[in-house]
Amino acid sequence: MKRNGMATVKRIRDKGRWARWCVFLCLMAEPVMVGLSDAADGLIASPEPGWPQWRGPRRDGLSDETDLLTSWPEGGPPLVWKRDGFGVGWSSPIVAGERLYLTGDLDGELVVFALGLDGAVEWRTTNGRAWRGPYPGARASCVYSEGRLYHLNAHGRLACLDASSGREIWAVNVLDRFEAQNIRWGLSECLLVDGPNVIVTPGGQAALMAAMDKRTGETVWTTEPPGKDHASYSSPILFRHGGRRLIANCSSAHGFGVDADTGELLWTVPLRNPHGANIAGPIYGDGHIFYATARTEDSRLYRLAVRDDGISAEHRWTTAVDPVTGYALLVDDTLFAARYLEAKWWFGIDWQTGRTTYELQDFTTGAAIHADGRLYIVDEQGAVALVMPEADGLTVVGQFRLTPERIRDAWTHPILHNGRLYLRHHDNLWCYDVRKERT
């Protein structure tokens, strides 16, 4: 008896038929092998359709949708519906299939809601206690994968839920498991699903970052912490660079990157501010990675250099952009982000040089996404804008207020799916139609 791959071959009577079978298997395998070896560098998208995770399919805030309104009428695009009752929180909804999923702190609990695309609640469940510390409210968005939802509450409870019913499948407290302490404003990480694993950054003595089996919750790998460091408030990205699959995120004092398959720590760069609060996550593009830190003028771009002994991060330029809760967007060769200190408005930064190419003073610091050649900006005071980047500047082609009164905590990131723009401010969720009129 001879072993050959998965088959056990006892006797071959027809050598010609066996030879043809071998050729067939080789031909079937060849495209897979070529696809793996020739995979291009860049962000790795979720295999799920829709807007299944934080900041979209690639976690970059960029939508591939087209045929959207090129400008908005006075008062903004048409409102499809508005719903309330979602409690306190800054988490963004996600969209998977025919449902939206949203979290909010309500009646002392972290509540996970499943909504139909008409905004009607289909089910609700809980994932532990609400956050009653500084800035009370829900933090993290859910992530959807293969019929399940994954969510991390502010106290470190990571839950896996059945997406069709809300039934809890498993849960674990990552602070306990990985010997970590909670942070001042509560854990806020939007989890990443990578194939069979769910990725979390507990920042504990037992693990800076960890991969857990998404089916069972068992630990798959851990990343050794780089000294006395702890978790921060940012969320990871997954990308391919130099033939390797990598994950990057921020801790309280570093920007870092690990091997996505083993958890090996590959690089760290300094990323400090007076509060140990790195909120905006890393941005990857064209072999470079950008880390922004809050309340300083010390955000930096690094070139990721592949070496025989691993990958190093080589400093290229520094900028004063510090988007805090807003993150940044890399559109083609321009990094769009707001500042928080002093000049609290929007900038465009040349990705190659770090030179400022755009300024927009009409809106204060906030969050944005990009679709069909335009920026969708929500500033922290509740102003919403559609902005067109042009050769001579940023042109506002539509704007409205999310609330009649000026507020200071409109920090929820917008999302766009199937021509609908979803905006949230605590208890309220709005859905706007931003598709071009059909003729």
Image: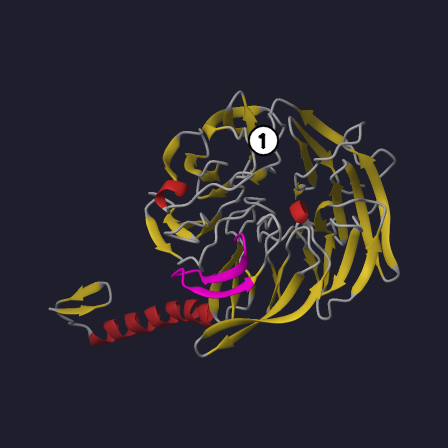
**Is residue 259 rendered magenta in the image?**
yes
Q: Is residue 357 visible?
A: yes
Residue occupied by mark 1: 137
Q: Where residue 125 appears, x then y in whole percent?
A: 47, 26
- Residue 60 lies left or right of residue 405; in this view the side is left
Name the residue rendered at 74%, 51% in the picture: 338
Total numbered labels: 1
Residue 134 located left or right of residue 323: left
The answer to if 130 sits in the magenta stretch is: no
Q: Looking at the image, is 62 positioned above or below residue 109?
A: below
Q: Which residues are magenta?
A: 251-269
Residue at the far front in the pictured view: 274
Q: Position of residue 438 (x, y in %)?
A: 78, 41
* Quadrant (top left/top right/bottom left/bottom right) for the C terminus: top right
Q: From the viewer's perspective, is residue 118 above or below residue 202?
A: above
Work out whether residue 242 can be spotted. no
Report helix, strand or loop for mark 1: loop
Which residue is at a point 70% across and 27% down the rendered structure image? 81
> Residue 169 location in percent, x, y?
36, 34
Q: Quadrant of the N terminus?
A: bottom left
Between 248 and 322, the residue placed more toward the observer is 322
- Can you give x and y, in whole percent of width and height, for residue 79 in the image? 75, 30
Q: Quadrant of residue 90?
A: top right
- Return the residue nearer the eye: 145 or 387: 387
The image's colouring method is secondary structure
Front residue (pair 434, 344): 344
Image height check: is 430 above or below 49?
A: above
Q: What residue is at 33 percent from the left and 74 percent from the top?
A: 23
> Hey, which residue is sitting farthest top in the picture?
107
Amino acid type at image mark 1: Gly
Residue found at the far bottom of this picture: 308
Q: Give the side of residue 399 with respect to residue 28, left or right.
A: right
